Amino acid sequence: MKPYTVLTYNIGGYEVLREIEHKSPHAEYIYVTDDRSITSKTWEVRYIDVPNDEDVFDSCYHIRFNPFDYATTDVVLRIDGSIQCIGNTDEIINYFIRGGYDICLLTHPIRFSMSEEYDEWCKTRGYSRTQADRILSYMTSQGYDVANYRGLYQFGFMIQRRNPVIEEFNAATLSLLQELAPDGKAVERIDQTVGSFVLNSRFSNQIKAMVVDERVLHSKFFRHFPHGSWIENEFDGSVIQPYLFNRPVKIAKLHYRAKVFYNQRWRPLSVVPFLRFVNRWIR
């Protein structure tokens, strides 16, 4: 059995197939889809029948929060279909395994506040203000400080280790997404806020978390695109101080080979904070 799995999915034609540029011999690569016309040269494609073909997010979240149903390994690196593997990810997984982590979380690059995140979704994505207020009221009723608690994670990238606490987290998050679903839907649309709430409020003293920031998606490991597009998301290296469970935290010291927009070159960075100096200099 290989040490880890890279898992992605494409349900309801929401994404395009993104082939892997450089594979690790130590990983299995699994692509889950309901589209039986999809074939791949680099992914092992698993075909499924979706539980609810009218609600793409319901089907996607059943995969997101049951990743070990598809993997044969005890460690899964799960990525959205909007993320392309371009490099060998062994360095990330080795760091995760050596550190004895349960989960790897990708912090939000701009916000840490739940209330601000919902404000942005309502303003720019047409998300329901009524639904946002309903969920924020639920969090507040549980004693959660939605405006000031610092801990917001992106769920399009995550590493998990198969163990009881992770299985409990996955089950609790999916259950709450179903409980908070708007009328006529099987599941709530935004899982990163609900999942962050579950992590922060119930698991801060149980889960050992490795933290990465937005740089990991714009590195020698991955490229990031808007859903269903091949126009790469631009990134200038700016990220806020990462927080984990309401406390400042250092990101994992990976050799990101971060992209610097000086002469459009890739430069290897052994110390990631150097990027901040370069960005200030070129501005």
Image: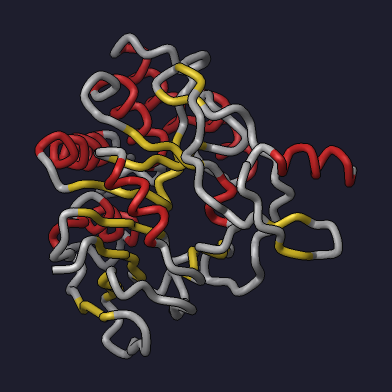
Q: Is residue 169 visible?
A: yes
* Residue 123 placement (x, y as % from top left): 63, 38
In the image, is 242 to the left or to the right of 34? right
Q: Quadrant of the C terminus?
A: top right
| Quadrant where the image shows the N terminus | bottom left
Left or right of 183: which side holds 246?
right
Measured as percent of width and height from the top left, residue 147 is found at 52, 16
Q: Which residue is drawn at the image coordinates 64% and 44% (left, top)?
A: 124
171 w.r.t. 149: above or below: below
Determine the image quadrant of residue 90. Answer: bottom left
- Whether residue 101 is visible: no
Q: Residue at x 75, y 55 (%)?
A: 260
The colour scheme applied to this rendered structure is: secondary structure
Above or below 156: residue 47: below
Residue for point 53% across, 26% down: 112
Q: Nearer the viewer, residue 174 or 86?
A: 86
At 26% from the left edge and 64% from the top edge, which residue is drawn? Answer: 5
The one nearer the camera, 67 or 133, is 67
How many numbered marks does the figure carry?
Answer: 0
Residue 248 placement (x, y as % from top left): 51, 20
Q: Is residue 70 above or below residue 257?
A: below
Q: Kindly give the residue lying farthest to the top in the view shown.
A: 143
Residue 101's place in the image compared with 76, above or below, is above
Nearer the observer, 75 or 134: 75
- Image coordinates of residue 132 in percent, x first then y, are 45, 30
